[in-house]
Amino acid sequence: FNYDFDWYFTAVCISSKVIVYENPNTDSKKIATLRYDIVEIDSEFTHTDFTKIHTIDTKIRGFVKASDLIYAADPHLEIRKIDDMWKITAFAPFD
């Protein structure tokens, strides 16, 4: 994609069946199903269970369960085996 990512507002769907809802609840209309898509997060919407998103091409807009996303700016470890020993090689995004 020719897209300027803002890592603090970018996430990836973590399964092949991430449902996009019209409203932030599972009883609302299902708009689409995403499959490991990269999405942009609406920074104006704050909710513990759902996140307002749109796809990079902006064709799909709606709400997904927050647990179905991994955020690009979330801290995570990178661990690699080096010389037969497991070592932490990065702690992103703060490394």
Image (spheres, rainbow, N blue to C red):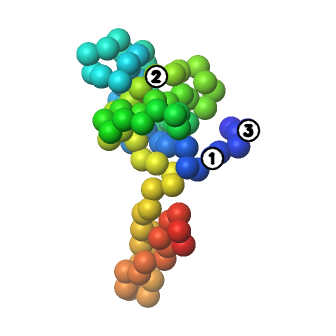
Residue 57 picture location, percent across and down: 63, 27
Q: Is residue 92 above or below residue 50?
A: below
Residue 21 picture location, percent across and down: 38, 20
Residue 2, numbered label: 3
Badge 2 density bin: few <14, some 14–19, many ≥20, Cα 10 Å: many
- Quadrant where the N terminus sits is top right
Q: Is residue 72 above or below residue 41?
A: below
- Residue at the extreme left of the image, as rendered: 27
Between 65 and 12, which is closer to the camera in this rendering? 65
Residue occupying the point 37% across, 80% down: 86
Question: Which residue type does callout 2 highlight?
Answer: Gly
Between 50 and 90, which is closer to the camera in this rendering? 50
Residue occupying the point 58% across, 19% down: 59
Query: Hey, which quadrant is residue 58 in on the image?
Result: top right
Pick whichever of labels 1 and 2 is earlier in the sequence.
Answer: 1
**Tag in front: 2 or 3:** 2
Q: In this view, does 4 lie above or below 63?
A: below
Q: Distance between the residues labelled 1 and 2?
A: 19 Å
Residue occupying the point 38% across, 30% down: 64
Pick whichever of labels 2 and 3 is earlier in the sequence.
Answer: 3
Question: Which residue type does callout 3 highlight?
Answer: Asn
Residue 91 picture location, percent across and down: 47, 70
Q: In this view, does 17 lie to the left or right of 4?
A: left
Disc 3 element: loop
Disc 2 element: strand
Q: Do the residues labelled 1 and 2 touch (CB within 8 Å)?
A: no
Residue 62, numbered label: 2
Q: Write down the residue under mark 1.
A: 6
